[in-house]
Amino acid sequence: MATSGIVFVGVALLLLASANAQLSESFYAATCPGGVQAVANVVTAAVRSDRRNAAGLLRLHFHDCFVRGCDGSVLLASTPGSKAEKDAGPNLSLQGFSIIDQAKAALEKTCPGVFSCADILALAARDAISFIGGPKWKVPLGRKDGFVSLASEAVTNLPADTLNYQGLINNFAKKGLSESDMVVLSGAHTIGLTHCSKITPRLYNFPGSSTGSDPYLNSTFVVAEKKLCPKTQSAAGNFIHMDGTKGGQTFDTNYYSNVLAHKAIFKSDDALISTSSGRTKVLSLASSQSKFFSSFAAAMEKMGRVGVLTGTQGKVRTQCSKK
Ligand code: HEM
Ligand SMILES: *[C@@H]1O[C@H](CO)[C@@H](O)[C@H](O)[C@H]1NC(C)=O
Ligand SMILES: CC(=O)N[C@H]1CO[C@H](CO)[C@@H](O)[C@@H]1O
């Protein structure tokens, strides 16, 4: 029993290692030479016309990789009787599907049936972030697309914004990502939007608070967020920047400064400085943009390898939303 378990783990590790070895930056050099550039063209045009798209594309790749690996399954539409990842609670606010569809349509014209949706997602995140002045990372290619997309798996695999430090570590560890990767990748929240409903419970009627707001939060920040998110029911769906002190337009270390100043939105952001290990990492990232950029680039390349399908393990979809 124990021996077969060890053999099984050994074989699984070998399979993982060989899947990794099969990804390569030049994967499409012969089969779709202009493909990588074609994706970049579509993505940069979309981000130039609306900078918000950068956040949408980055989050799309993250959600893809955390549910069944980076296999494009986040793009699949629900089918009768089966609710897909994109229709799960945590995913309802995902953005950028139409940009991926546009890139895919361009690729299907020049090299039909060759370029996977999972690879488009990985490239799109990289191209979008580098276009807005963030770091640029390598994107080895050759991912295949999966066939399965289940809303229930999105709920169980994506980290909840209520997790504490150990909960976040455990969630990332299930994807083979380290504590450091987790702290570094959380820095993605330097851009992008969230809903007022995510912070209003901390602004009004906070349990046990004499002022009504969460005493952990900086009081100047509370005043500013209350203006953006009034107590009314209708304001719950209003959008606010996750980086509420610098406008959330630039990819920089300001997320970590917010966390240190108690000006971040989620409990999971606060959690990063709730242990001495996390606090040390946050202080270091907050103090050096070049350190943040190089660490983020390395962690994104690592995230892009999570659970990838290669070779005959999956297929290349011709339409990213359809099996
Ligand atoms: C550490 C655990 C994480 C938690 C708990 C978390 C949670 C969230 C939540 C709750 C939102 C707002 C959703 C909404 O209001 O509709 C959000 C947005 C976002 N997240 Fe995360 N996230 C995490 C990690 C990541 C990672 C690793 C990345 C990318 C590498 C990422 C990228 C983003 C981006 C870019 C947005 C904004 C999307 C937009 O503006 O359209 N997040 N996240
Ligand atoms: C809260 O933030 C303001 C600036 O926005 C700062 O002046 C103040 O010192 C902060 N409060 C605390 C308790 O750190
Ligand atoms: C807009 C929306 O439906 N948001 C949901 C996102 O997911 C969380 C659970 O992770 C729900 O509580 C929100 O209602």
Image (tube, grey):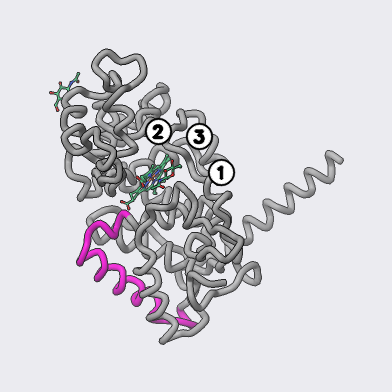
Image position of 88 (left or right of 242): right
Mark 2–mark 1 CB contact (< 8 Å): no
**Which of the two labelled residues, at mark 3 and mark 1, occupies the earlier sequence position?**
1
Quadrant of the image containing the C terminus:
bottom right
- SS class, disc 3: helix
- Residue 202 in magenta? no
Residue placed under numbered mark 3 in the picture: 169
In the rendered image, residue 317, in percent from the top left (x then y), is placed at 53, 75
Q: Label 1: which residue?
A: 156
Q: Where is residue 227, by image quadrant?
A: top left
Query: Of callouts 2 and 1, which one flags the residue occurring earlier in the amino acid sequence?
Result: 1
Return the residue at label 2: 268
Residue stretch in magenta: 29-55
Amino acid type, callout 1: Thr
- x, y percentage for residue 176? 56, 45
Name which residue type carries label 3. Answer: Ile
Is the magenta region chiefly helix, strand or loop?
helix
Position of 305 compared to 238: left or right? right
| Quadrant housing the N terminus | top right
Marks 2 and 1, how far apart at CA: 16 Å
Q: Residue at position x 34%, y 48% from top? A: 294
Residue 40 part of the magenta segment: yes
- Label 2 or label 1, whichever lies nearer to me, is 1
Q: Is mark 2 within 8 Å of ligand 1?
A: yes
Say what amino acid the circle numbered 2 marks. Answer: Ser
Image quarter for ligand 3 equals top left
